Image (cartoon, rainbow, N blue to C red):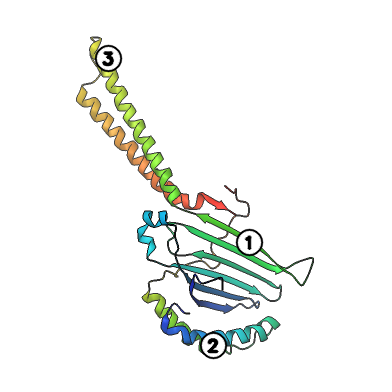
C-alpha cells in the first residue's frame, strides 16, 4: 500500500552461481513526481517515468542479501544510488539488520563549476587586453614610442585570449564530466 | 505489472513458480533442478522485446554497479 508510485516490476536477469548464490536484476518503473519549480526548469524530464535497476545477491548459506539500486534514466539530472546489506543480527538471531547507504549526485553541479571556470578564464584574458591597452595609451601620452603598433598588440591579445578560452572550455568540459563522480551527498 | 503490458500474465506464472522454488528449495540449500526454466524463457522473450521497443537502456551495466569507496565525506 505504500508503493503506488511503482508502476511495473520485471526480472531481466537471474542466475544461480556455482557457490549457491542467487543473482538477480530487476527493472522497475516509477512515477516521476517533481516539485513544480523543477517541472519548469526541466520540462523535458516531466513526461518520462523513471527506470530503475535493482541488482541483488541472495546468499542462503551465509544468510545475507545485498541489493544495489539506481536510476538509469534522468541520469543527467540526478542519480540516486542505494546499497543495502541484510544479515542476521549478531546479538539476536531472530533479527535481521540492514545497513543502508545512499549517494545522491547531479552533474548539474558540474555545470555551475564549468561556468565559473570559463568566466574566470575569460576575465583574466580580458584583463590582459585592457592592461596592455592602458599601457599603450600611457606610453603614447608620455611621448614614448609604444613598443608595438595597436594592430599587432590587439592581434597578440586576441590570440592569447583564444588559447586561454579554449583551454578553459576543455577544462570546463572535463570538470563537468568529472563532477558527477566527485560531488556527491553521502548518507 | 510488467513493463511489457502483454507480458504480465507470463510474468505472474513465472513469479508463482519462482516463489515456490525459492522458499521450498533454494533457501533450504537445494539448488538441483530448475523447474521454472521454461516459464522464465517465455517470460524473458516477451519482456526483453518490450524493453527494446521502449528503448530502455539496460545494456552494458556492471552488476551491483561500480564499487564505492568505503569512506566518503558527507556534505
Label 2 chain ID: B
Q: Which secondary structure, mark 2?
A: helix
**Residue A120 occupies quadrant:** top left
Q: Badge 2 is on which residue?
A: B37
- For discs 2 and 1, the disc positioned in front in the rendered view: 1
Callout 3: 10 Å neighbours few (<14), some, many (20+)? few
Chain ID for label 1?
Answer: A
Q: Residue at x 63, y 83 (%)?
A: B22
Q: Secondary structure at mark 3?
A: helix
Number of numbered discs on residues = 3
> Of marks 3 and 1, which one's residue comes earlier in the chain?
1
Residue beneath the point at 67% across and 68% down: A86
Screen quadrant of the N terminus of chain A: bottom right
On the question of residue B25 being in view, the answer is no
- The residue closer to the viewer here, A106 or A170, is A106
Residue A23 lies, with reference to residue A184, above or below; the image says: below
- Disc sitting over residue B46 in the figure: none
Residue A67 position within the rendered picture, expressed as x and y whole percent measured from the top left: 59, 68
Q: Is residue A18 above or below residue B69?
A: below
**Residues indicated by labels 3 and 2 sit on the same polypeptide chain:** no
Q: In the rendered image of this protein, does residue A157 appear above or below residue A16? A: above
Q: Residue B12 in the image: x percent, y percent?
A: 52, 85
Vertical placement of residue A79 versus A56, above or below: above
**Left of A83 or right of it: where is A125?**
left
Q: Which residue is mark 1?
A: A100
Amino acid at each position: 500500500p505504500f508503493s503506488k508510485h511503482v508502476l511495473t516490476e520485471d526480472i531481466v536477469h537471474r542466475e544461480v552461481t556455482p557457490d549457491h548464490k542467487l543473482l538477480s536484476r530487476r527493472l522497475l518503473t516509477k512515477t516521476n513526481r517533481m516539485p513544480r519549480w523543477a517541472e519548469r526548469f526541466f520540462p523535458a524530464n516531466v513526461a518520462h517515468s523513471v527506470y530503475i535497476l535493482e541488482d541483488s545477491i541472495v546468499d542462503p548459506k551465509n544468510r545475507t542479501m545485498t541489493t544495489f539500486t539506481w536510476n538509469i534514466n534522468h541520469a543527467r539530472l540526478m542519480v540516486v544510488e542505494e546499497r543495502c546489506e541484510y544479515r542476521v543480527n549478531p546479538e539476536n538471531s531472530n533479527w535481521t539488520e540492514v545497513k543502508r547507504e545512499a549517494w545522491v549526485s547531479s552533474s548539474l553541479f558540474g555545470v555551475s563549476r564549468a561556468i565559473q571556470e570559463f568566466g574566470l578564464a575569460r576575465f583574466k584574458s580580458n584583463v590582459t587586453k585592457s592592461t596592455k591597452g592602458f599601457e599603450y595609451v600611457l606610453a603614447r601620452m608620455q611621448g614614448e614610442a609604444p613598443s608595438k603598433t595597436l594592430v599587432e598588440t590587439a592581434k597578440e591579445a586576441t590570440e592569447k585570449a583564444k588559447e586561454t578560452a579554449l583551454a578553459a572550455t576543455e577544462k570546463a568540459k572535463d570538470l563537468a564530466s568529472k563532477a558527477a563522480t566527485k560531488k556527491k551527498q553521502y548518507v | 505489472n510488467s513493463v511489457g503490458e502483454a507480458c504480465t500474465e507470463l510474468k505472474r506464472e513465472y513469479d508463482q513458480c519462482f516463489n515456490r522454488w525459492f522458499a521450498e528449495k533454494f533457501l533450504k540449500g537445494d539448488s538441483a533442478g530448475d523447474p521454472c526454466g521454461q516459464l522464465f524463457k517465455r517470460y524473458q522473450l516477451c519482456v526483453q522485446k518490450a524493453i527494446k521497443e521502449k528503448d530502455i537502456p539496460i545494456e552494458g551495466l556492471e552488476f551491483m554497479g561500480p564499487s564505492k569507496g568505503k569512506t566518503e565525506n558527507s556534505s
